[in-house]
Amino acid sequence: MELFLLFISAAIINNFVLSMFLGICPFIGVSNKFSSALSMGMATTFVMVITSVVSWLIWFLVLVPNNLEFLQIPAFILVIASLVQFVEMFIKKVSQPIYRALGIFLPLITTNCAILGLALLISMKDYSFLEGIFFGLGAGAGFTLALIIMAGIREELELADVPKPFRGAPITLIVAGLLALAFMGFAGMIS
Amino acid sequence: MELEILIAVATMGGLGFIFAGALAVADKKLRVEENPLIAQVNEVLPGANCGGCGYAGCYDFSVNVVAGKTPVTGCPVGGQDTAIDVATLMGIDASTSVRMLPRILCCGDNEEAVKKMTSYYGPLSCSAMAQISGGDKLCLYGCLGGADCVVACPFDAMVMNEHGLPEVIDELCTGCGMCVKACPRNIIEMHPEDREVFVFCKNHDDPKTSKNVCHVSCMGCGICARKSDGGVVMDNYLAVIDYEKFDETKIPFDKCSTKVIRKQNFSKN
């Protein structure tokens, strides 16, 4: 039950994109088509779960016992960069169309602050191994959810009669703001 | 203290080593086989990634050449040597590609173009002048003299001459077309290197205005168009050569009062 609550909390209440404003770049960048938003969400979730596992191991088994807490950020970045490389190879092997649809945003997962944020939060909140995995899963699910909602809205927006000055980026940012406002409604339900 | 540093270095080094090993294994296992021809074609290209071919870089160009979507002569920078190399790799005959060079179609230099009564003070780049006030000269179509094309040229193949007009150094030019894009007045055009007859003007003003703004403008009298059997057409007071139908012997070069349509041998200057 605890773990489930943690998952829900990470996915919806403390949504990484819409409540903590992490990972805005792919949120705006890859949310113009539903299919690519979904695969981007999947790829990011995959990286997030593995990151939470590996960074938990490195933090609690390597860095803390050796009093190397100050190496936290470089070590985590190393983990994330390697994982993204791996995911890139994997996706290129499995599906060329998805690889091309994600384009530059795939290698940019490396610099997605949501992932470094996740690793840092896990070490900061002293989660257990299992909690870390569920937190990562929840964060990934929340990221995917935000991306999918945004993509759905933006696909409809294509057909809408948007006033000229708001077309393109402005209306996207307004929609993102309104979405964040909606998610703020969950604030405080589970701390 | 020293021990701490050692531990830190060893930890980060060890981590890096482990991840590098894992990635090397993954690379072996997950390698995607792609056509080896792509890499070979990419090898013989200039590798400048200038985008002159219209693709996102040399690699993208190779992919499209191998896929048969673009001709082997598509690389304007590498010219004929590259075209032959690519064609050999692709196993086809290299049709001789014509080298394209930029030609500056304006001769309103500092002496010939009429200056405004006022002076221009401001950023000395063509793009700024074109937007703010149109620079010093009255002509709305001619060279602004701000040397944007010279700046844009990645190969130092453009210089401003002493009269304030840009000149192409044909030997250095690779035909990438950056100068064409840089010119806000669109007076630079790409033409085959052996083409010698041009209308060196872009002025669309009516005869009276064009006479007032420049001594060497095309006034739009249309005498060349009338004599050339469709080789020259008039477009809004400007003679434009239609190189498809054009016949050099029919152009009345000496009838042009401003000598703006003329034959110029570029290889000699």
Image: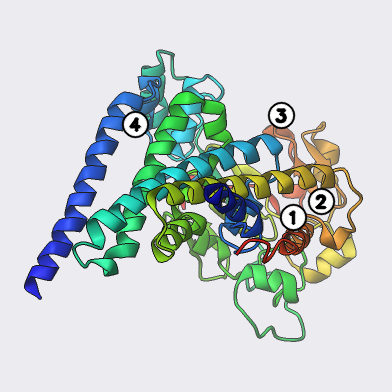
Marks 3 & 1 on one chain: yes
Instruction: Answer with mark 1 or mark 2, whichever residue precedes in sequence.
Output: 1
Marks 4 & 2 on one chain: yes
**Disc number at residue A164?**
none
Distance Cα–Cα, label 4 vs label 2: 43 Å
Distance Cα–Cα, label 1 vs label 2: 7 Å
Give the residue at mark 3.
B244
Local secondary structure at mark 2 = loop
Depth check: A94 or A5 in front?
A5
CB within 8 Å, label 3 to label 4: no
The quarter of the picture where the C terminus of chain A appears is bottom right
Q: Residues within 10 Å of mark 1 (few under 14, many from 20)?
A: many
Q: Could you say where residue A50 lies in the image, as x and y percent from the top left?
A: 41, 43
Q: What is the number of callouts on the image? A: 4
Q: Quick check: B232 above or below B30? A: below
Question: In the picture provided, is A175 more to the left or to the right than A147?
Answer: right
CB within 8 Å, label 3 to label 1: no
Instruction: Answer with mark 3 or mark 4, whichever residue precedes in sequence.
Output: 4
Q: Amino acid at mark 1?
A: Lys
Marks 3 & 2 on one chain: yes
Res B227 quadrant in image: top right
Q: Quick check: B107 above or below A101? A: below
Give the residue at mark 2.
B238
Instruction: Answer with mark 3 or mark 2, whichever residue precedes in sequence.
Output: 2
Distance Cα–Cα, label 3 vs label 2: 18 Å
CB within 8 Å, label 1 to label 2: yes
Give the residue at mark 1.
B202
Residue B188 in sight here? no
Q: Amino acid at mark 4?
A: Val
Chain letter of the residue beneath label 2 in the structure image: B
